[in-house]
Amino acid sequence: MQKIATTHLQPGMVIARNVFSADGVLLLSAGTVLNNIYIERLRLLGLSSIYIQNPLISQLSDSEIIDTIPEIVREETRVQAVQVVHTAFQNLATTHNIQTRQFKETASMIIDEVIKNNGAMIQLTDIRSRDGYTFGHSVNVCVLATMTGVQMGYSIPQLRELALGAMLHDAGKMLVPKEILVKPGPLTACEMKIMQQHPDLGFDILRRQSEIPLLSAHIAFQHHEKFDGSGYTRRLGRTDIHEYARIVAIADVYDAITSDRPYKEGILPHEAYEIMMSLADTHFDPAILQIFLSQIAVYPVGTVVKLNTGEVAMVIRVIPGLQTRPTVKIIADENEQLLKDGRELDLTKHLTTFISKVFTETEALHFSFITPVR
């Protein structure tokens, strides 16, 4: 299974994961064989990439690989959550009111599943359409923040406050002009000033809702503050920023930089890991960041890598706590000639072998759909 840009899709490729629209409608099911009509439709809908099956993994099928990846929350739960956010945020944009009951129910559902799947890691990037970025992002931030809260030993009431505030952290963006929100390029200074009003706008709406805890509302207010006091809107620093907001700030940035946006493609998880680490003590609380990053697969399943032996391999399993030492399947020799039946290699047991390069989605295509030579 590999994430492939829709610009590189070809007829005959097989979808590995269900593809949904911005409002949670199933567009194409896993197992669907792509044709030119499907490919063009995906591009028109603003989907920048999807997951497809890799035919080179012959002894371990894509369906078996997917089964080895514990999901943090079920696909059904994620889709339902996106639908709730989509509907409520659209209503918020027109009425300036928010329906809290569905948000609280959805937050509780996510908490239950995260606790049940405690120990699972973030492996797969959520695929979203250009117009659906904000809704999927809100759900992802909720999941990531809740995972972190569980690892920090939060009680159920604390997790409810955290999850609800995380899901609503960008509520204020619904009052930002859409042309600024989805602009395909850098914002002007004036546009940025307008965009930076969204924490205040969100807090102003949420604090008026009697069923939303004030601490949840403060997540929306403070999620762009930075640990060193250089953020906005009040330039708070360190423990003056509520711990919930310090958690959500980390989840917010990680999901943003690894996701495809209207104006740029997301970066690879190992690159995101390095960037996040470089921002400890300045942007982020370093202690919380360490807990957060312990839940991230640095080399997710499906990643194509080069080993220090010169061989090319695909990651097929990741062990929690040993994210830099996954199990891989060799798919090409040191001359980058594709192999029919490469061996599996558990890097936790082969300590002199390590990953020396991660191939981009475009580079990885060369090792996915060319007929093996031997």
Image (tube, helix red, strand yellow):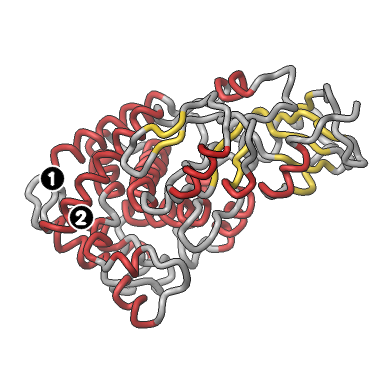
Label 2 Cα neighbours within 10 Å, binned few <14 / some 14-19 / many ≥20: many
**Residue 92: horizontal and vertical position, in percent?**
16, 54
Q: Residue at x 72, y 25 (%)?
A: 57
Q: Quadrant of residue 277?
A: bottom right
- Numbered label attached to residue 331: none
Q: Would you say residue 185 is visible in this rendering?
A: yes
Q: Amino acid at mark 2?
A: Ala
Disc 2 secondary structure class: helix
**The residue positioned farthest toward the bottom in the image shown:** 189
Q: Nearer the viewer, mark 2 or mark 1?
A: 1
Mark 2 or 1, nearer chain start:
1
357 versus 105 height, above or below: below
Q: Residue at x 38, y 24 (%)?
A: 116
**What quarter of the picture does the N terminus occupy?**
top right
Of residues 85 and 72, which is closer to you in this image?
Answer: 85
Find disc 2 in the rendering and name its residue.
217
Of residues 203 and 366, which is closer to you in this image?
Answer: 366
Q: Residue at x 30, y 48 (%)?
A: 166
In the rendered picture of this protein, how many numbered marks are placed on residues?
2
Find disc 1 in the rendering and name its residue.
99
**Is the C-beta separation of discs 2 and 1 under 8 Å?**
no
Q: Amino acid at mark 1?
A: Gln
**Residue 352: horizontal and vertical position, in percent?**
85, 37
272 versus 340 height, above or below: below
C-alpha gap between disc 2 and disc 1: 14 Å
